[in-house]
Image: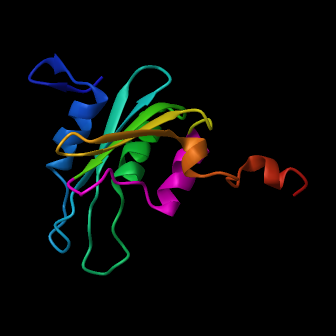
Amino acid sequence: MIKKWGIVMSLKEAALSVREKAYAPYSNFKVGAALRSTSGEIFSGCNVENVAYPEGTCAEAGAIAAMVAAGEQKLAEVYVVASSPQPVPPCGGCRQKLAEFGNRDVKVTLATVEGDEFETTIGQLLPGAFDASHMEDS
């Protein structure tokens, strides 16, 4: 679990907190993502821009990398937040990354910093996802 000042944080709190640490000097579009693994642990990530576009990384990718680095590989829930007029969806690459580590029915909450939320699933974000079953005869 993510703790701040000794207090266990929710996915929403973790995503909002890590969003503040985003490195976005070019776009000023800060994104935070937090995910819960099937063990119950929470991992978070923020976007990190680079002057040599597109060499930056997305918040969702950072959270997934933190989960994998901790030895876990299965998503139970995801929360993504940004300062945008409506809840911000993951990019196409991050949708594929989420599909790699989570079942189609895994809940994904997309949110704004003002508190608007939209609940969906990995399967709804990426219908017809490419997965390992497509490579069975390889």
Query: Residue 85 magenta-drawn?
Result: yes
How far from the left and from the top, in percent, is residue 117?
32, 40
- In this rendering, the count of numbered labels is 0
Q: Quadrant of the N terminus?
A: top left
Q: Which residue range is magenta in the image?
A: 83-101
Residue in the picture at 26% in, 73% down: 50
Give the percent coordinates (x, y) of residue 20: 14, 49
The residue lying furthest to the bottom in this view is 52
Q: Is residue 31 left or right of residue 66?
A: left
Q: Residue at x 65, y 51 (%)?
A: 127
The image quadrant that residue 70 belongs to is top left
Q: Quadrant of residue 118?
A: top left
Q: Is 71 covered by the magenta stretch?
A: no
Q: Nearer the viewer, residue 132 or 129?
A: 129
Q: Quadrant of residue 34?
A: top left
Vertical comparison of 118 with 11: above or below: below
Could you say where residue 27 lies in the image, as x and y percent from the top left? 20, 72
Q: Which quadrant of the rendered structure holds the C terminus?
A: bottom right
Colouring chosen for the image of the structure: rainbow
The residue drawn where x is 24% and y is 57% is 85
Q: Position of residue 60 (x, y in %)?
A: 39, 49
Q: Nearer the viewer, residue 38 or 119?
A: 119
Tell me if 49 is positioned left or right of 126 in this view. left
Residue at far right of view: 137
Side of 17 relative to 61 (left or right): left
